[in-house]
Image: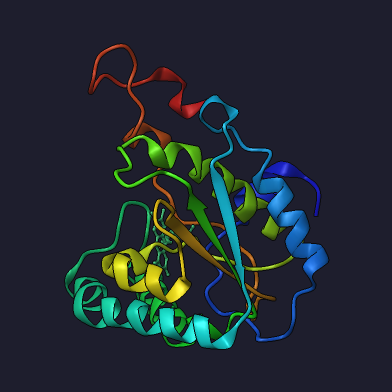
Amino acid sequence: MTDFFEILYSCRAMRRLKPDPVPDELIAKILRAGMQAPNGGNTQKWRFLVVRDPAIKKAVQAWYKKAYDEVIGPRYGSSEPPPGVTKDKYKRQHDAVEYLTEHYHEAPVWIVACLEDGPTPNRSAGASIYPAVQNMILATRALGLGTTLTTRHLLFEKEAEAALGLPPGVHSYAILPIGWPMGKFGPVGRAPLDEFVYQDRWGQKWPGASA
Ligand SMILES: Cc1cc2nc3c(=O)[nH]c(=O)nc-3n(C[C@H](O)[C@H](O)[C@H](O)COP(=O)(O)O)c2cc1C
């Protein structure tokens, strides 16, 4: 697929992935797309760990699942659907989140997006890696591969980063589990513009919202 807006509008979180192999050639395309992103001062402090080793993925999945069991699962169970999302769709999202939790390590390849951010990263550090992460998500979609931006491992950051073998001064910001999708790409659930966009004064409707 090459039409940018079609890619954008059908790029939902793909959490059900086949274990079938994904060639390095496609992963290289995704990584190169990531590295076209803006980053502070073009210092390119990003580092990307491509993980295929089943033992490493399994070790991180154990922390990812613990975070689901202790924090995320109960939260889903007791929360209302977000804006623009029906109860039914939210339930399907919860099921998919649970599925990915159980099968996280079975995605054939992960890209772990990292930054050489030093011992005390500040609040703006993520601005130099998340644009690359989003570029990679869109590139993955363009290639017909599925992925989801995941950060839940950060609830057990030290343990998960030790399992990933990250050196001191390097931190992970997202893990993209990548594989061929089981389901179909499709539209995301979002509320209309006028719920989020104001003009000139906070709370004042932006007339362009219905354009
Ligand atoms: C900061 C951030 C962290 C996320 N972490 C996870 C995660 O750990 N696991 C997961 O299944 N989805 C995760 N997601 C994906 C969101 O749940 C997803 O983007 C949202 O539900 C919208 O999905 P949609 O684009 O398919 O509508 C994360 C997204 C963001 C932006």
Left or right, 125 with respect to 146, comes to: left
* Residue 156 percent coordinates (x, y): 28, 70
Where is 121 relative to 153, above or below?
above
- How many marks overall? 0
Left or right, 200 with respect to 5, comes to: left
Q: Most extreme residue toward the top, as rendered? A: 200
Where is 41 relative to 126, above or below?
above
Asked if residue 88 can be seen in this view, the reply is no
Asked if residue 20 can be seen in this view, the reply is yes
Residue at horizontal 63%, vertical 68%? Answer: 146
Q: Quadrant of the N terminus?
A: bottom right
Quadrant hosting residue 204: top left
Residue at horizontal 59%, vertical 57%? Answer: 48
The quarter of the rendering in which ligand 1 is drawn is: bottom left
* Residue 124 percent coordinates (x, y): 36, 34
Q: Most extreme residue toward the front, as rendered? A: 168
* Residue 119 percent coordinates (x, y): 32, 47
Q: Which sits in the foreground, 60 or 85?
A: 60
How is the protein colored in the picture? rainbow
Quadrant hosting residue 107: bottom right
Q: Which sits in the foreground, 118 or 137?
A: 118
Where is 2 relative to 66, above or below?
above
Residue at horizontal 44%, vertical 37%? Answer: 127
Residue at horizontal 17%, vertical 73%? Answer: 78
